Image (cartoon, helix red, strand yellow):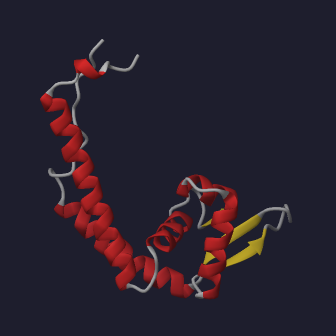
């Protein structure tokens, strides 16, 4: 059962505010890093989710839509832009031709490796700063 608004104290709001602030700072860092590489933040996330998909180095459009929390038609448009930029390639699945696999191309892999390295360094620099607030559960 969610807490009622009057059961939240100043410390709760301060913790939530700090958490959202740190999330937004990291998000802004990520946006600027992607733009510096000549791609959009969504293109970076797409590349990351392809490479980081559990168990394999490719993902389907539906899987990417879930990871991006986006509609499939929006992901298809994003994929088209990434394909035109030479970052990814769509391929039919060998076993089920209805499925489309999305693979990184060498140019996409290079951009992703550079961006992932600086994101990792930024996250390491935030150790101890960017933490999930410990909010007590109130009945």
Q: Residue at x 38, y 20 (%)?
A: 2
Could you tell me if residue 88 is visible in this image?
Answer: no
Quadrant location of the C terminus?
A: top left
Left or right of 22? Residue 70 is right
Left or right of 76? Residue 124 is left
Left or right of 13? Residue 75 is right
In the rendered image, residue 128, in percent from the top left (x then y), is placed at: 15, 50
Q: Is residue 14 above or below residue 92?
A: above
Quadrant location of the N terminus?
A: top left
Could you tell me if residue 126 is visible in this image?
Answer: yes
**Quadrant hosting residue 116:** bottom left
In the rendered image, residue 65, in percent from the top left (x then y), is placed at: 62, 57
Q: How many marks?
A: 0
In the rendered image, residue 88, in percent from the top left (x then y), is placed at: 61, 79
Q: Is residue 19 above or below residue 37?
A: above
Q: Is residue 18 above or below residue 30?
A: above
- Pick the residue in front: 6 or 104: 6
- Pick the residue in front: 116 or 136: 136
**Quadrant hosting residue 104:** bottom right
Left or right of 22? Residue 65 is right
Q: Residue at x 54, y 58 (%)?
A: 68
Outermost residue to the top: 139
Q: Residue at x 55, y 53 (%)?
A: 69
Q: Is residue 60 above or below residue 116?
A: above
Q: Residue at x 21, y 62 (%)?
A: 124
- Pick the residue in front: 54 or 66: 66
**Quadrant hosting residue 57:** bottom right
């Amino acid at each position: 059962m969610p807490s009622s608004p009057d059961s939240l104290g100043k410390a709760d709001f301060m913790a939530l505010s700090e958490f959202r602030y740190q999330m937004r700072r990291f998000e802004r860092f990520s946006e600027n890093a992607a733009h510096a590489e000549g791609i959009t933040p969504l293109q970076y996330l797409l590349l990351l989710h392809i490479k980081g998909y559990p168990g394999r180095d490719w993902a389907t459009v539906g899987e990417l839509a879930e990871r991006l929390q986006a509609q499939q038609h929006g992901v298809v448009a994003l994929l088209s832009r990434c394909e035109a930029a030479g970052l990814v390639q769509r391929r039919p699945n060998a076993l089920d031709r209805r499925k489309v696999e999305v693979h990184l191309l060498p140019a996409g892999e290079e951009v992703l490796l550079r961006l992932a390295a600086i994101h990792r360094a930024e996250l390491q620099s935030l150790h101890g700063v960017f933490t999930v607030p410990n909010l007590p559960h109130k009945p």
